[in-house]
Amino acid sequence: MDDSISTWIYNLTSLTTLLLGDNRFNNSNTMRGTIPSPIFKNLTMLTIISVSHNQFNGLIPFSMFANLSKLIFIDLSDNAQLEVETENPHTVPTFQLQSLLLNNCILNKHSGGGIPTFISTQRRIETLDASYSFLRGTIPSWLLYNATVSSLNLRGNSLQCPFPQSTRHNKSMLGKLDISDNKIYGALPSNMETLFPSLVLFNMSHNELKGTIPSSIKKLQMLTIMDLSVNNLSGEMPHGLISNNTSLKYLKLSNNKLQGNILSKFSNMTELAVLLLDNNGFTGTIASDMLSSPSLKIIDLRKNNLLGHIPSWFPDLTNLGILLLGGNFFNGPIPLELCLMQNLRILDLSNNAISGSIPSCLNNISSWMTETPNNIDWSLGSQSGLPILNVVKFPVDELYTRITTNLTTKSTTLTYGGLPLALITGIDLSMNQLVGNIPSQVGHLKELHFLKLSNNILSGPIPESFQNLKNIESLDLSHNKLVGTIPPQMIELYSLSTFNVSFNSLSGMVPYEKQFHTFDERSYMGNPDLCGPPLQRNCYNPSQPDQDMKGEEEGSAILDSPIFFYLWVTSSYALGFWGFIALLTNKSRRRKIFRIVDCCFICM
Ligand SMILES: *[C@@H]1O[C@H](CO)[C@@H](O)[C@H](O)[C@H]1NC(C)=O
Ligand SMILES: *[C@@H]1O[C@H](CO)[C@@H](O)[C@H](O)[C@H]1NC(C)=O
Ligand SMILES: *[C@@H]1O[C@H](CO)[C@@H](O)[C@H](O)[C@H]1NC(C)=O
Ligand SMILES: *[C@@H]1O[C@H](CO)[C@@H](O)[C@H](O)[C@H]1NC(C)=O
Ligand SMILES: *[C@@H]1O[C@H](CO)[C@@H](O)[C@H](O)[C@H]1NC(C)=O
Ligand SMILES: *[C@@H]1O[C@H](CO)[C@@H](O)[C@H](O)[C@H]1NC(C)=O
Ligand SMILES: *[C@@H]1O[C@H](CO)[C@@H](O)[C@H](O)[C@H]1NC(C)=O
Ligand SMILES: *[C@@H]1O[C@H](CO)[C@@H](O)[C@H](O)[C@H]1NC(C)=O
Ligand SMILES: *[C@@H]1O[C@H](CO)[C@@H](O)[C@H](O)[C@H]1NC(C)=O
Ligand SMILES: CC(=O)N[C@H]1CO[C@H](CO)[C@@H](O)[C@@H]1O
């Protein structure tokens, strides 16, 4: 089929629905070229036009739809090269739309990039999406306060103005307001509850808001999702923002300049599931009466000024799956009670002043031990009975990307090692003052995807049990005081793609087979007693004939080296096989040799 709009459409005068859209799932049919404006002249019965997800280009004057009086739905979205002009020529359309979707088009490029003015004549419009459509200028007050729109999305434009003030018409019909990623500056109105009584979703992240969060927000009875992250908001969080009487489930205030205690006393967050307050200036301790919400699934308090001990009552939050407390001033030990958190998937206590040793009961946490289906339900829809929520979900992928890019050395994209993001598990205890051995139980957390223990004072060996970390993708043990060898069985960790044991006191031969072939010397820096490829240091140095006398540790390293293997082959010939084996009095050394032999037979 031709991929441009054919002329035969012109004669379908009784056509009511024109769907040339949504080729997302069927890319064999993407349409290109321009949309000829005479095409619609005779199609006066049209109620629905959708040409979304194509590659139309050129400029279409919106006036070409003006005489199609039955239109209720126009979707021109996701045609990145398509210019849509609504102001010139200016027309008052004969239709009354319900939905207008112009996202990912180029809107009013030659008339100042303003919001289409004809919308103020639309008395039935409910949905307007003009996100990512190159809008400039201001948000007119009528759009918020004197329009029938209940779902407004202007995300990702360059709108630059203070938050629009209400003039005479104070009450907004808006249920969903997303003006994130623009340049809205100034303060939020103090009378939010009178202005937006129907608000369910409010996203103003990535703007230039200043001032405090108006305490009237807590009176918004239906507010379920609020994202004011990445602004310049200051002051304290309003008392009771998450109280008895709000329906807030998702609160994100990350990357602002908020201060004071995290939550006022007596907050009763029965509904709250996601609390993201990272990168602010919150102070004080986490008091037990603050977090009494059985619904909490994610807590992110990273990079604040919180102090005191890690609370031992976190297990009371039985649904908590992600607990991120990194980058604060927490001290004291890791409470053993954390081992009761059966649903914990990601734990970040990094960059604090936590002391003591790593609890040996971490293998009690079932989501790190057994493959469990992810029991976090991310949809918000039906149970709240609010129709607008049917299309609202937690932006869980975005969330996980943010969480895991900071935690791992990998830059994650939409999936992490092919996993749905909501299934990632990991522990980050780096940059603390942890002492003692790494408990062997840690090596049994076979569902773990990342483990960061770097920059502590951990001593003792890397437990041999680490060979059981079958799903580990990122393992960082650098900057500790670990001794002994890198357990050679770890070469079986096929998922491992980031490995770092730099700056310890490890010795012996570096495993350099299978997965470990992909790691270079940057994984082993600052361990003067490690040897063998990929390091420059050879394990066997013939100028030091008494090397073998230096004990088992060193001896094993030599046995592990390929040079030794060749020597062994040669001497076996000379002595006869059994004669040579008889020389191997030491049991563990014998085992080591058999392992080398095994390996080489397999390799051959
Ligand atoms: C519209 O219809 C009239 C008659 O039905 C026809 O003469 C005219 O060419 C049509 N216009 C277009 C643009 O097809
Ligand atoms: C719409 O109809 C009016 C009169 O019926 C006509 O003057 C005008 O040219 C038409 N506009 C378009 C874009 O077809
Ligand atoms: C508000 O809408 C009404 C119609 O519902 C209209 O008459 C009035 O002019 C509008 N006011 C503003 C400021 O746009
Ligand atoms: C608008 O607000 C003013 C004062 O702020 C109030 O007097 C007036 O009654 C309000 N109008 C409506 C329609 O709510
Ligand atoms: C709010 O908007 C930002 C940027 O546009 C987006 O990344 C984020 O996912 C949105 N938050 C919610 C809760 O929808
Ligand atoms: C919560 O409700 C109780 C009584 O039900 C009340 O005493 C308390 O002040 C309320 N807390 C907030 C923060 O509104
Ligand atoms: C919290 O709210 C629930 C329901 O809204 C109520 O039953 C419970 O008593 C409240 N608890 C406190 C401590 O206010
Ligand atoms: C392990 O978890 C069970 C319940 O799941 C609990 O009863 C037990 O005390 C926990 N053990 C430790 C050491 O935390
Ligand atoms: C391992 O850690 C050291 C010290 O933090 C760092 O310099 C090095 O680049 C890391 N190696 C890899 C492979 O990331
Ligand atoms: C969600 C909730 O409990 N809302 C209640 C808050 O308080 C007012 C009265 O002050 C009730 O009408 C709401 O139902």
Image (tube, rainbow, N blue to C red):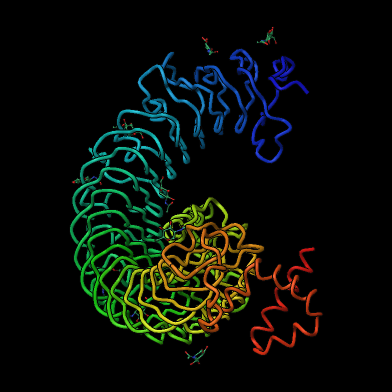
Q: Is residue 216 above or below residue 556?
A: above
Ligand 1 placement by image quarter:
top right
Judged left or right of residue 373, residue 450 is: left
Judged left or right of residue 158, residue 259 is: left
**Quadrant position of residue 172:** top left
Name the spot of residue 472 as percent of width and height, x first. Answer: 57, 68
Name the spot of residue 304 as percent of width and height, x first. Answer: 26, 64
Name the spot of residue 141 as percent of width and height, x first. Answer: 29, 35
Name the spot of residue 142 as percent of width and height, x first. Answer: 32, 35
Who is closer to the viewer here, 312 or 494? 494
Judged left or right of residue 438, residue 574 is: right
Look at 28% across and 64% down and name the residue there: 241
Quadrant of the rendering where the C terminus is positioned: bottom right
**Quadrant position of residue 30:** top right
Who is closer to the viewer here, 198 or 571? 571
Look at 76% across and 64% down and name the residue there: 603
**Quadrant position of residue 374:** bottom right
Look at 70% across and 35% down and name the residue there: 27
Query: What number of labels is visible?
Result: 0
Quadrant of the rendering where the N terminus is positioned: top right
Q: Is residue 537 above or below residue 285?
A: above
Q: Is residue 184 visible?
A: yes
Q: Is residue 440 above or below residue 76?
A: below
Q: Is residue 272 visible?
A: no
